[in-house]
Amino acid sequence: MRSQLQFALAAVLLAGTALFLHARSRNEVFPARAPLSSLPHELGGWVGSDVTIPKDILDILGPGEFLLRVYRNRSANNPYVDLFMAYFPTQRAGDTIHSPKNCLPGAGWSPLESTRITVSLPGHAPFPANRYVIGKGTDRQLVLYWYWAHDRGVASEYWAKFYLVTDSMRMNRSDGALVRVTTPLHSGENPDAAQQRLLSFAGEVVPLLDNYIPR
């Protein structure tokens, strides 16, 4: 019963958000920003290689700008880090950010553990992020992701929708983004160790986000 109520409330919130944004008549503000593709390929000790996103996936994601890049650390024998960023300049036409957890089954991955963590990085206020351990066969990966808009990170897609409405009223903007970092787990590796690897990488990315996702 509780899950049905939560689903109903979520559906009402999403529908209300879409109706509100569609009803806004003022011309929307689109601040100047750098394209995601210009994010440096070298970040600290990490070196990245772009990965092409298949057209059928882009069709599902909708009208936005997307970056998929694999970074490897030159100074350590660690697994790679996969960075995915999705930026939507406007969400008023109903093209809102997709939650990664809804895409996992279609890609063959299943969530094994999930929780939320607080990301605390130098020079930025702490913000919450989702943490998932996912599996496919014997493979395991650790995923961290969060929603980002106007120098603010949130873990809940419903809080992201709430801020989408308030920012539209306050700033006449409906842009927003998703940031996801993923890394494979070594055989027998503790997810907490993999989390430190992801947070170390995130410490290189987060200070740059305002260049691509305007505050």
Image (cartoon, helix red, strand yellow):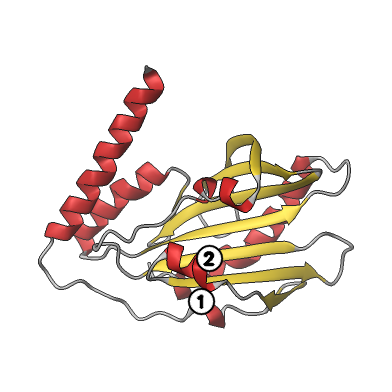
Which one is earlier in the sequence, the residue at label 1 or at label 2?
A: 1
When the figure is inspected, residue 90 is found, relative to residue 21, above or below; the finding is below
The residue located at (68%, 41%) in the rendering is: 133
Q: Give the answer, above or below, for where 2 lies relative to 25.
A: above
Secondary structure under tag 2 reads strand
Residue 180 percent location from the top left of the image: 57, 57
Which residue is situated farthest in the top direction here? 1
Residue 83 placement, left or right of 34: right
Residue at point 48% right, 45% down?
Answer: 155
Q: Which mark is residue 181?
A: none
* Label drawn at residue 36: 1
Q: Position of residue 59 (x, y in %)?
A: 44, 68
Q: Quadrant of residue 68?
A: bottom right
Label 1 neighbourhood size at 10 Å, few (<14), some (14-19), many (20+)?
some
Q: Marks 2 and 1: in contact by CB < 8 Å?
A: yes
Q: Amino acid at mark 2?
A: Met
Query: In this rendering, would 36 be left or right of 75?
Result: left
* Up-down relation of residue 8 to residue 62 (above or below): above
For the C terminus, give its image quadrant. Answer: bottom left
Query: Is 101 displayed left or right of 28 in the figure?
Result: right
Camera-nearest residue between 202 and 110: 110
The picture places residue 203, in percent across and down from the top left corner, at 64, 61
Q: Is residue 38 left or right of residue 11?
A: right
Instruction: Residue under label 2, please give it.
Output: 85
